[in-house]
Image (cartoon, rainbow, N blue to C red):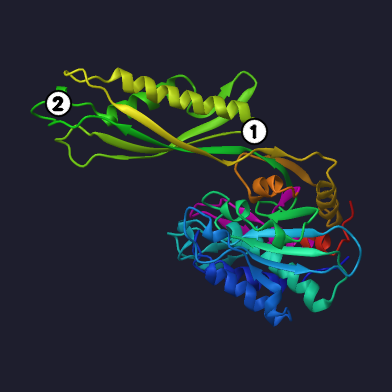
Amino acid sequence: MHEPNLNRALELVLALMPIPGRSGEESIVAEFIREHLQAAGVAPGDIVVDKAHTKTPLAGNTGNLILKLPGTVKGPRRMLSAHMDTVPLCVGSQPRREGDFIRSANPATALGADDRSGAAVVLNTALEIIERKLPHPPLTFCWFIQEEIGLYGARFADAKLLGKPAMCFNYDGGSAGKVTIGATGGYRMAIDVRGVASHAGVAPEKGVSAIAIASLAIADLHRNGWHGLVVKGSQRGTSNVGVIAGGDATNVVTDRVQLRVEARSHHPKFRERIVREIEKAFKNAAKEVTSSLKKKGSVAFDGRLDYEAFKLSDKEPCVAVARSAVESIGREPELAISNGGLDANWLFQHGIPTVTLGSGQQSPHTVNEALSIPDFHDGCRVALRIATGTAKN
């Protein structure tokens, strides 16, 4: 079994985490990865960037970074991936080692281990294979953009540039023993509530408050169990009103409120039911609020499926490879299903069965985020065994 250079891997992740690179601004991260690949001997022309960023709602400054290596041994092409972007809370991260953990010395920021630890695992694996000339099946390494705001890098990836991998191993999770074989589906919607403006002191009865409409709708969803954790018989899902904005002054009956809402479930039909219940609550609330002039408000919905749910069979070859790799380093594989979206959701839609593996992240998207160094090192070990084909299915 091949062992990676764990000191170099730690240096890479420590260098990657403080680089500013929130969604849409990943070019500096991509350049860091490119420079290290070229220093290892990769020809500049072998490193390609697709045009995914030209198709995303947020105009980004780079696309997905892709490296393909021809195999030195026969076998189906394997792909290793991670995403380069972080949430805005990570900008200003100052990674500092504290025993077996790395945390941000800046108390106002998250660390950025999500997902710079995954990016480092994939980069270190590529460097090990290239520099040491390790035998390997055909390989694709991909670093995705804009995962945090809707999995857009994976969604709009140029599949032709990936080389038709038979399986993928995506690094974006917690414990190195965790093997995520499925994830929920997510639907996002913008709700535009229109009312009627009026002077709130002189003639409030002539107005129709958009805020009142939105409040009644949200209260109805909460009372009837359609907001937050949604459990109806054997069906489960979640919904959340995450953003609400409207109004300029207290002396005006607010005539417009805009909301951003999401619904998730591992069961597509139940997720659709949650969406219908949200729409029904807002439509009913719009009918309920009436002015003295018999005027009513209105609601409009603009929704889209962000990613569809998926679940791999335990017998899928990539699941067998992942389990074998985890077992090969002396750990017990923990099969899991994610309640959040992953790049794996869209890779699965592209026809690439994908498991997501851990690289030591803990408490992501918070100022308490940490990176477990032992878990990160184990993630590097697992990745190298997968990439060299020493973990069999």
Say few, some or many: other residues with alpha carbon within 10 Å of mark 2 (under 14 / 14 to 19 / 20 or more). some
Q: Nearest the camera: 227 or 51?
A: 51
What span is colored magenta in the figure? 353-381
Give residue 160's quadrant in the image.
Answer: bottom right
Vertical order, 174 against 383 (above or below) = above
Vertical order, 72 against 145 (above or below) = below
Q: Nearest the camera: 86 or 371?
A: 86
- Residue that mark 1 sits on: 266
Q: Nearest the camera: 357 or 278?
A: 278
Q: Please give the name of the residue rendered at 69% of the width and 82% of the height, measured from the top-left corner.
A: 39
Vertical order, 32 against 91 (above or below) = below
Q: Quick one: label 1 or label 2, which is nearer the N terminus?
A: 2
Residue 196 position within the rendered picture, expressed as x and y whole percent measured from the top left: 21, 29
**Mark seen at residue 204:** 2
SS category of the residue bearing label 2: helix
- Residue sticking out furthest to the right: 74
Q: CA distance from mark 1 to mark 2?
A: 45 Å
Q: Amino acid at mark 2?
A: Pro
Q: Quadrant of the N terminus?
A: bottom right
SS category of the residue bearing label 1: loop
Residue 359 position within the rendered picture, expressed as x and y whole percent measured from the top left: 68, 57
Q: Is residue 37 magenta?
A: no
Q: Nearest the camera: 217 or 308?
A: 308
Q: Amino acid at mark 1?
A: His
Position of residue 46 in the picture relative to residue 30 (left or right): right
Residue 177 position within the rendered picture, expressed as x and y whole percent measured from the top left: 75, 50
Position of residue 202 in the picture relative to residue 177 (left or right): left
Q: Please give the name of the residue rendered at 54% of the width and 32% of the height, measured from the top-left corner.
A: 238
